[in-house]
Image: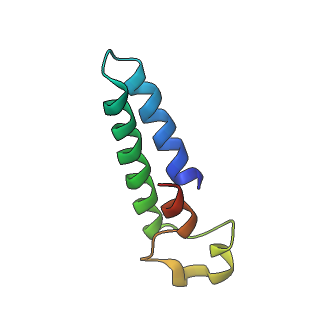
Amino acid sequence: MVDALKPAADALQSALAKPDDIEAALKAAVGAATEGASQTASMHPRHGRSSYVGDRTLGHVDPSAHAVA
């Protein structure tokens, strides 16, 4: 989940520091969360339920990160 939450929080904080509107900041956060979640498809799982499945998860987005995004 952190793979989606951290980029979203960083993007939201950065966007809110600019004089843009809230909608643009939220869209930036959603985009960052989605990108962070999609990057999990190439990661070897080390924690959570995916760690029990091992390398068979490669090529698939982490379900928790996807749900958060």
- The color scheme shown is rainbow
Q: Nearer the viewer, residue 18 or 7?
A: 18
- In percent of width and height, residue 50 lies at 62, 74
Image height check: is 13 above or below 63? Answer: above
Q: Residue at x 44, y 32 (%)?
A: 12
Q: Position of residue 57 (x, y in %)?
A: 52, 79
Q: Nearer the viewer, residue 54 or 13?
A: 13
Drawn side of residue 28 relative to residue 7, left or right: left
Image vertical order of residue 32 relative to residue 42, above or below = above
Q: Against 18, is 57 above or below?
A: below
Q: Residue at x 35, y 38 (%)?
A: 28
Pinpoint residue 59: horizontal percent, then vertical percent.
42, 77
The image shows residue 22 at horizontal and vertical percentages of 37, 27
Q: Quadrant of residue 63?
A: bottom right
The quadrant of the rendering that contains the N terminus is: bottom right
On screen, residue 21 above or below 42: above
Residue at the (50%, 51%) spot, across then down? 4
Residue at image point 50% right, 66% down = 43
